[in-house]
Amino acid sequence: MLIVVKLEYDRIKEKLGFKIMNIQLLNKKINEINDSIEVVVLKTTKYLEKSEKKLLDNIFFSKESFNIYFNSLNNRLYVSCLKLKSENIKTAFFKVIEFLKKTKINSIKIDIVQSNKEFDISNIVEGLVFGNYSFDKYKSVKNSKNIEIFISVSNSKKSIDELQKLLDKALIISNSVNFTRDIVNTTPQDYTPKTMAQTALNLVNKNISCEVLGEVEILKEGMNAMFSVGKASINESQLIHLSYKPKNPKAKIVLVGKGVTYDTGGLSLKRGDSMVSMKCDKAGASTILGIFEALGKLEIPFEIHGIIGAVENMIGGNAYKPDDILKAKNGKTIEVTNTDAEGRLVLADCLCFAQEKIKDIDYIFDFATLTGASIMAFGGYTTAVMGYSEKLKNKIAKASKKSGELVGFLPFNEYLEKRLKSEVADMVNTSANKNGGAITASLFLSKFIEDKNKKKWLHFDIAGPSYRQENWGYFYYGATGVGIRLFFKFIGT
Ligand code: BES
Ligand code: MG
Ligand code: ZN
């Protein structure tokens, strides 16, 4: 059943507005590329000419990474980078673009081989594309600068065809990260569950299909937990099912996402200051939308499903309440002890829906801004990963290293599981004891994972890294699109 959501407001149609970068590979020596500023990444100032060395040492080039200096005499832009490892290369190029945005310079050239090291093109691209990101949709004055980028590859060990493929892939994935960032950064008045359904429908192409269920169908499916969370909102809840089906897929992967377009906490209302930023509560779903945006442009040999629960957690005369007992799709009953633990209710039903509709699943991952406790546990930059399979967690640890996304693992135990016991229903949605809250939330979700899928499931709590109210590394204030790069490394892209 395919229900095409009609748009109620024109503004919803507004295209997501990030700028795509123009990056060209040139099979020319760096000096043969004219009219551009040369970006030089400096591990050390040792080999520079004396006066230049002195100047750069005075501004701590040999002591600190990511200092920037533009020498107008030789048209070089220097960036210090004391360790040439992947994450630092990304940050170095990010800082270059961040700097250039404040100048009149609009064309740069980069030698892929510098300091006797051939940079990985995808690291350069990520740094540049994330540096170029800006969320100025709501600014009256926009930064519309276009920077042209030439990469000299004549010294590369790789063929230009191979490099072009790597460049294209890196551009697709890093732009899909920016696509997700735009969604998460968009305000709750402009981004409702129906807007999210529309974003998903816009991704449909020859390999991607999409089904959207409204509240009538959600209730018909027996998804009372998800329905209850959204019922006080004037914006109708939407269950979105995206499918990517290539020919002869190697495996079947299901991604389930929390798409709470705004989380007031419901009747267990959040305090004003912790409510600010809760537009980020759709980040899990938005990560899945970003993955599908990239899937539309890549050739990936896996069948991939995205199941998104898009709801708004509001207050009102019709709101679900603490003390309510909700019956989830799998028949299990949940005593609501806190309406602010809404994400797990939405996910519970979405996980059941996914396992009922999709057979022979190889992996089932859920992405959610689920708990403040995961931020407490890891400090905010790290995704908290939980699940029953050590083997699968090890694979994620490897993907984390390759992608640069930080992950940490939290362990389950039977004592924490006991905290979910209810006197009147099968379980409570929150326990009175808040310690280990990221783990109890995940254990709650595990009650909705069928036994045969227990070892195929992982839960990714992205409450910390998906949205930060600060600039950090190669990210600006706001959404980060976390999960996308990790996922693509996991599947070997
Ligand atoms: N959306 C929040 C979690 C969150 C917190 C995301 C901070 C991003 C930043 C979630 O719905 C929530 O409110 N969780 C509660 C659970 C509690 C009531 C057990 C929390 O973490 O306080
Ligand atoms: Mg909440
Ligand atoms: Zn929430």
Image: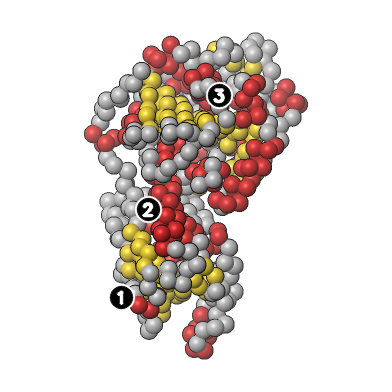
Q: Quick check: can you spot residue 163? A: yes
Q: Residue 134 carries which label?
A: 2
Identify residue type, mark 1. Answer: Asp
**SS label for mark 1:** loop
Foreground disc of the pair 2, 3: 3
- Disc ID at residue 75: none
Judge left or right: residue 98 versus residue 119: left
Q: Tell me: residue 248, above or below residue 350.
A: below
- Residue 298: % across, % down: 41, 44
The reply to whether the residue tagged 2 has its Cβ within 8 angstroms of ligand 1 is no
Of labels 2 and 3, earlier in sequence is 2
User: How many marks overall?
Assistant: 3
Callout 2 touching callout 3 (CB < 8 Å): no
Q: Is mark 3 within 8 Å of ligand 3?
A: no
Question: Residue 35 has which mark?
Answer: 1
Q: Where is residue 323 in the image (x, y as percent from the top left)?
A: 57, 14
User: Looking at the image, which residue is at 36% across and 18% down?
Assistant: 1
Check disc 2 and report its element: helix, strand or loop: loop
| Amino acid on which the number 2 mark rests in the picture | Ser
Q: Mark 3 points at which residue?
A: 360
Q: In terms of depth relative to the viewer, which is nearer, 434 or 49?
A: 49
- Judged by depth in the image, the label closer to the viewer, 2 or 1, is 1
Q: Residues within 10 Å of mark 3 (few under 14, many from 20)?
A: few
Q: Going from the N terminus, do you reach mark 1 or mark 3 first?
A: 1
